[in-house]
Image: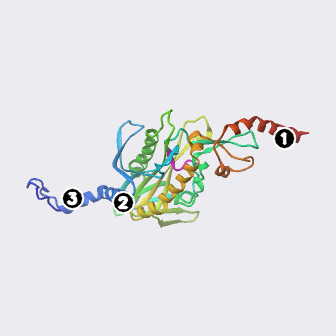
């Protein structure tokens, strides 16, 4: 351990301790990893370490290791949407393994990634060949569930545990990881959504793509369970999905999913440069192309009847002309129904 030139003699390690013991304690605390990850992100992101948020349950102030932000729009061009990527990051170090129990299949998350800064998180479309309306999440309207980062991304898991020593053997426990990693990231996402909620008079909107990321300096093992065996696989990137029940009048809103990307520290730079940033670029371009539809929550999709939500890729702003044609569409639909019955 080095000593500064101005250091007084009293500022030194006491009896019974060594530099090696202190250095090991610092290494295991997680702060060196936090510093390294922050330095990596500062090349292309605006970074805030020890980012604070309010725990919605306890109302206490808590901190997350890193909040990093990067804009994906040209400020010289006028648009009602300003896409921004926000990473909420917690770093963990351990000498023992983290164990992920894989889901049997990829989990459908129509509102991944979390969005913040908008009036609403859905878009309702009218069409010219049916009086009905179609509603889906902003993410679905932009085709995000089909994006390679989502559909072709990492394997999903619903459970995460950590190996702990018990005598000469190892046991797996999930309580510490849930309270120290999963819960803080989920609560931080909720706080971020509330913090970035726009005023009712807002005309321009910062559309935040929010990704919760856990960076791990420890072996990561994915467990794939079958009827007859279990396969253990070293995997540097997995997506942990947490489902929460929500009180809502609409049954489709009664389950809320939060996803946390768990990434090994040696894979982190590749994760950001090859996967996260290209995903944000693709999504931001789509958002800028459909800014009016996103802000208003309304769109027009031609010939929607009988088609899937993929037709939202053809959406355009809902104009007074489409509104004016709606009574005609309703009458035409009724006439078709009558003709089928005669």
- Which one is nearer the viewer's eye here, 281 or 16? 281
Say which residue label 1 marks: 336
- Looking at the image, residue 16 lies above or below residue 109: below
Q: Which of marks 1 and 2 is nearer the N terminus?
A: 2
Dominant SS in magenta: loop
Q: Give the range drawn in magenta.
A: 110-115
Q: In this view, does 99 lie to the left or right of 122?
A: left
Q: Which of marks 3 and 2 is nearer the N terminus?
A: 3
Q: How many marks?
A: 3
Instruction: Answer whether residue 112 is magenta in the image.
Output: yes
Question: Residue 195: image x %, image y %?
Answer: 43, 39
- Which one is nearer the viewer's eye here, 218 or 67? 67
Q: In this view, does 95 lie to the left or right of 84?
A: left
Q: Distance between the residues labelled 3 and 2?
A: 25 Å
Q: What element carries label 1?
A: helix
Question: Residue 97: image x %, image y %?
Answer: 40, 62
Say which residue label 2 marks: 40
Say which residue label 3 marks: 22
Q: Is mark 2 on a helix, strand or loop?
A: helix
Residue count near mark 3 (Cα–Cα under 10 Å), binned few <14, some 14–19, many ≥20: few
- Looking at the image, residue 68 lies above or below residue 272: above
Q: Distance between the residues labelled 1 and 2?
A: 62 Å
- Which one is nearer the viewer's eye here, 220 or 109? 109
- Looking at the image, residue 271 lies above or below residue 292: below
Q: Residue 317's quadrant in the figure?
A: top right
Q: Residue 294's quadrant in the figure?
A: top right
């Amino acid at each position: 351990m080095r000593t500064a030139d101005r250091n007084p003699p009293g500022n030194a390690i006491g009896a019974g301790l060594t530099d090696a013991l202190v250095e090991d304690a610092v290494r295991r605390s997680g702060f060196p990893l936090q510093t390294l990850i922050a330095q990596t992100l500062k090349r292309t992101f605006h970074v805030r370490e020890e980012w604070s948020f309010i725990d919605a349950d306890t109302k206490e102030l808590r901190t997350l290791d890193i909040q990093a932000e990067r804009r994906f729009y040209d400020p010289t061009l006028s648009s009602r949407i300003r896409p921004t990527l926000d990473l909420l990051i917690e770093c963990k170090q351990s000498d023992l393994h983290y164990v992920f129990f894989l889901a049997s299949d990829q989990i459908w998350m129509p509102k991944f990634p979390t969005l913040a800064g908008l009036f609403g998180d859905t878009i309702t479309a009218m069409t010219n060949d049916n009086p009905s309306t179609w509603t889906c999440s902003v993410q679905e309207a932009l085709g995000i569930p089909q994006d390679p980062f989502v559909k072709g991304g990492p394997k999903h898991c619903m459970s995460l545990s950590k190996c702990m020593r018990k005598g000469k053997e190892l046991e797996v426990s999930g309580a510490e990881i849930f309270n120290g990693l999963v819960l803080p990231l989920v609560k931080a996402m909720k706080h971020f959504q509330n913090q970035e909620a726009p005023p009712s008079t807002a005309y321009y909107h910062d559309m935040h793509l929010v990704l919760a990321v856990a960076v791990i300096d420890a072996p990561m093992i994915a467990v794939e369970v079958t009827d007859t065996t279990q396969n253990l696989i070293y995997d540097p990137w997995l997506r942990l999905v947490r489902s929460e029940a929500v009180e809502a009048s609409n049954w489709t809103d009664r389950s809320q999913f939060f996803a946390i990307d768990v990434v090994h520290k040696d894979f982190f730079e590749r994760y950001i440069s090859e996967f996260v940033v290209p995903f944000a670029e693709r999504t931001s371009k789509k958002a800028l192309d459909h800014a009016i539809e996103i802000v208003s929550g309304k769109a027009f999709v031609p010939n929607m009847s009988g088609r899937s939500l993929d037709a939202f890729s053809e959406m355009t702003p809902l104009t007074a002309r489409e509104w004016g044609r709606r009574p005609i569409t309703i009458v035409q639909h009724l006439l078709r129904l009558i003709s089928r019955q005669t």
